[in-house]
Amino acid sequence: MIRKVDSSNSGSPPTSNTGEDNRPVEIVLAGWVDRFVAWLIDFIIVSIGLGILFALLALPFWFSYYSNDMALEHKNFEPFHYLLSSLAFFGYWTYFEHTSGQSIGKRLLNIKTTDMSGKSLDTKSAAIESFGKSFLLPIDVILGWLFTNNKRQRIFNKISNTVVIKLRPRDELTENIRYRKD
């Protein structure tokens, strides 16, 4: 959640000489539990899609007379399966983090990935941030807890200068709205 913080007691918003609001911005960081649940939702959704895709690709081999040979071939496919799955997760997260900052799981939990100032991500930052959770998640999280916990960043969040924030509830967005004619 991003909001302007009013540190004065005057009741009027502080402004600069240019008429701009110069109050500090407060960004509310999302908790690790919310982030994990969002990741888990995304993991389940993408895994179901990949399971269906791999089952359809394997369908012609289900009726093969050489089932023992197929079991051996399946063992040889495991590294390729990991790589394809990781690439699918990478594409999924990069697309959603770049376009809206929210994957399906993050939308459900009302959290969003932004740059350090609360703005949308560019493609490069989204790709770097997504790489860690697609290919190296355990290492990424553990090192993040050890070295960047003050901003709740994974290592690849730190590298890409991104954070995961909590969004304002809908009812809070309708308060204090002013309309001005140009």
Image (cartoon, helix red, strand yellow):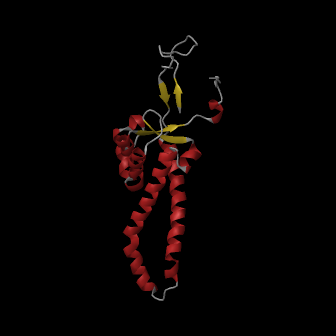
- Tell me what residue is drawn at x 44 percent, y 39 percent: 163
Q: Which residue lies furthest to the front in this view?
A: 182
Establish if 112 lies above or below 14: below
The residue lying furthest to the top in this view is 10
Using the image as rendered, state which of residue 124 and residue 171 is in the foreground.
124
Q: Nearer the viewer, residue 36 or 1?
A: 1
Residue 46 in the figure: left or right of residue 138: right
In this rendered view, identify the residue nearer to me: 96 or 80: 96
The residue lying at 54 percent from left, 68 percent from top is 52
Horizontal relation, residue 135 to residue 41: left or right: left
Quarter of the figure with residue 82: bottom left
Count numbered badges in the picture: 0
x, y (%) of residue 49? 54, 63
Residue 125 x, y percent position in the rendering: 40, 44
Q: Position of residue 146 (x, y in %)?
A: 34, 41
Q: Using the image, determine if residue 167 lies above or below residue 137.
A: above
Residue at 48% in and 26% down: 25
Rendered location of residue 27, percent (x, y): 48, 31
- Residue plotted at (62% across, 31% down): 173
Q: Looking at the image, which residue sits at the far bottom?
A: 65
Question: Is 16 placed above or below 135 here?
Answer: above
In this view, 52 is above or below 60: above
Q: Quadrant of the C terminus?
A: top right
